[in-house]
Amino acid sequence: MKFHPAISIILGIVTILMWFILAGILGLDFSKSISNTSGGATLIILILGGFVATYFTEDKKIRYSIYEGLIFTAFVGLSKNLKLIFAAFIAYVLFIGIGGFIGKMTDNKERQNFKNHFEKGFNPIITIVMGFIVANFFYYLLLGITNIYTSYNIKTAALTIAVISNVIGGFTATFFAKEKKIQYGIYTGLIILISSLAMKLIHGTLHVNYSSISIVEYLLFAGIGGFIGKITDNTGRQSLKKRFNNGYNPIITIVMGYFIATFFNNSILLITCTYNSNPFGVTQFIVAAISFVIGGFTATFFAKEKKIQYGIYTGMIILIVNLVLQLIYGPTIHEPYYIKIGKIAGYLIASGIGGYLGKTIYARKQKEAE
């Protein structure tokens, strides 16, 4: 049974509206349904609505489901609530569009075309968009499944879900591309980061702690996803193995050290809820010192020349970035200058120790290999 696209779009809209009506009858707060108990059901209904809009047409175009999602976004726009428009665009267009894709894949010819494209690989622009869509899909789906806003440790669950989603998004962007390059995963993380920061800015929740961890979280783990996508290919594995044996440009390893150290520091403090837990930041200092050691180790161990100063440079960059963030957002802890100076010295020593460990451990591995 096939309908005109306009009719199938209307049928898809009716399918979704029936769920919202039922949610209202049952007393469910569907304005927050993506993130509470009814979230999983809402996502399924959105996908089903997109499926209906595409499946019951003659040519099964995904854009029919996209049109449906835009119509729902327009409904939110009529309320003139700017804070909801972006969220509605992601929720409706994204998940309804996924339903349209499923509807399109029910056709044998379309499945064969997709299979041919899959074997050859897609344009990286397409795979990056796919990565963004897949990452958001898993993020919102897991939010609904885990009932995030009523969980025991909200911050831990949110961080875990974001990490998993970014890895999957980065993997998708690289794995499905013609050339499996890690940077496609990183570009996906950058797009997710920009959209996330835009949402926080609209809602007025942008803060130094969360913005800094978001930068590292999205880029680092989307890059890890891209790395996984690359090593699924034999050529990619051989290339990475050769690069690892030869070592990387120190600029790259210093950036790696910065990202890894910053993520470790912020995630530990966020998970343990120890931000600003002590007026003189003793707990923060201990965690940060370990982070500087890890960052310094990474910068030296993976470089072509194993120089301790690469670890120290990493520590200096971390301190400079944090200083800039504090100038923009204001300090999170007010403490005497002599304590600040002592901490800076301690952090630089820690990053130097990390560089020393990187150089020593690599030399030991080389000696054992001989």
Image: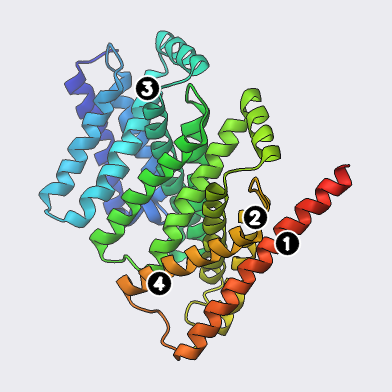
Q: Is residue 117 above or below residue 151?
A: above
- Residue at which label 2 appears: 300
**How much space separates mark 3 and mark 1, taking CA atoms?**
55 Å
Q: Nearer the viewer, residue 75 or 177?
A: 177
Instruction: Of the two numbered discs 3 and 4 on the same chain, state the one appearing first in sequence.
Output: 3
Lateral position of residue 167 relative to residue 233, left or right: left
The mark closer to the camera, 3 or 4, is 4
**How much space separates mark 3 and mark 4, taking CA atoms?**
51 Å
Q: Circles 1 and 2: CB distance less than 8 Å?
A: yes
- Residue at which label 3 appears: 103
Q: Is residue 137 above or below residue 275?
A: above
Instruction: Of the two numbered discs 1 and 2 on the same chain, state the one appearing first in sequence.
Output: 2
- Residue at which label 4 appears: 323
For mark 1, give the secondary structure: helix
Q: Amino acid at mark 4?
A: Leu
Q: Amino acid at mark 2?
A: Thr
